[in-house]
């Protein structure tokens, strides 16, 4: 379902699509990996249990360092910016990386409509990139595991550039890699991070309603359209190769 009937006056010539919360429901992966990580950090099972799907749906999307810091603080009952959590991130990252490499994708699935939606996007013949704040290697691994990697000409993670979304730099660099101007590029995401980055970069933005927007209604975030499924979009009206 489209929550707005807007269609751009001129089609976009490229698209950039977010990963977590837009293409794949990865909360199950995060729960399992973080529980292993927290246990390695000496957390009691009761502390680990505080980091659940509900907490992570409010937390995912701003990069791994932010996720680890906030998860540690939450497990220990401390404020998000507690010095103890900040200082523990490097050690936690080493454990997290080991577990994520082993478990990536095992507790995650594409959202309904994603596979058909990507096939419809690919049929338009425009350059397509996946841009996420997840580390690039993990993004590549997950997309391959779910059979989605072949749709993308480029995949960039949160470690690919000097700054992460919501900074516009990753979008600007991705547009450059695709060879398409930002104004002719559509960003598809699930959060205010994606929308903020797209607006600052000069890209159009379309938002899905089922993802992880830090606990806030995504329909309150300005966008060209809000959609319930990627296969509900008439992509032939949104995307067209440059001539």
Image: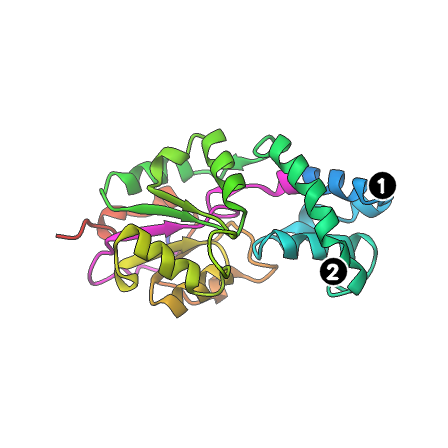
In front of the other: 38 or 215:
38
Which residue bears the numbered disc 2? 86
Instruction: Point out the stretch of residues depicted in magenta.
Output: 3-31
Label 2: which secondary element? helix
Query: Label 1 to label 2, Cα distance in Å?
Result: 21 Å
Residue 52 point in image, percent of width and height? 72, 46
Please give left or right for residue 78 compared with residue 19 in the image. right
Q: In which quarter of the image is residue 78?
A: bottom right
Label 1: which secondary element? helix
Q: Disc 1 or disc 2, which is closer to the eye?
A: 2
Residue 106 point in image, percent of width and height? 60, 30
Please give left or right for residue 36 compared with residue 189 in the image. right
Q: Which residue lies furthest to the left in this view?
A: 243
**Residue at figure coordinates x 33%, y 63% from the top left:** 203
Number of other residues with Cα within 10 Å of mark 2, as a class: few under 14, some 14 to 19, many 20 or more: some
In front of the other: 129 or 83:
83
Number of other residues with Cα within 10 Å of mark 1, as a class: few under 14, some 14 to 19, many 20 or more: few
Residue 130 point in image, percent of width and height? 41, 46
Please give left or right for residue 237 compared with residue 30 in the image. left
Main SS, magenta residues: loop
**Residue at figure coordinates x 46%, y 32% from the top left:** 144
Rendered image: mark on residue 45: 1
Q: In this picture, is 219 found above or below 60?
A: below
């Amino acid at each position: 379902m489209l929550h707005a009937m807007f269609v751009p006056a001129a089609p976009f010539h490229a698209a950039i699509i977010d990963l977590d919360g837009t293409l794949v429901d990865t909360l199950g992966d995060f729960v399992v990996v973080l529980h292993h990580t927290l246990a390695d950090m000496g957390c009691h099972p009761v502390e680990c249990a505080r980091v659940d799907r509900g907490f992570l749906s409010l937390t995912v999307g701003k990069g791994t360092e932010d996720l680890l810091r906030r998860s540690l603080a939450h497990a220990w009952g401390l404020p998000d910016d507690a010095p103890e959590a900040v200082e523990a991130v490097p050690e936690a990252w080493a454990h997290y990386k080991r577990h994520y490499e082993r478990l990536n994708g095992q507790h995650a699935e594409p959202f309904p409509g994603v596979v058909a939606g990507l096939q419809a996007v690919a049929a338009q013949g425009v350059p397509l990139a996946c841009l996420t704040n997840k580390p690039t290697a993990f993004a590549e691994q997950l997309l391959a595991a779910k059979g989605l990697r072949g749709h993308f000409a480029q995949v960039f993670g949160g470690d690919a550039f000097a700054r992460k979304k919501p900074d516009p730099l990753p979008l600007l660099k991705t547009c450059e890699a695709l060879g398409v101007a930002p104004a002719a590029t559509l960003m598809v995401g699930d959060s205010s991070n994606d929308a903020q980055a797209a607006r600052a970069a000069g890209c159009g933005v379309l938002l899905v309603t089922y993802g992880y927007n830090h606990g806030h209604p995504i329909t309150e975030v300005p966008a060209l359209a809000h959609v319930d499924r990627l296969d509900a979009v008439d992509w032939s009206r949104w995307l067209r190769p440059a001539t």
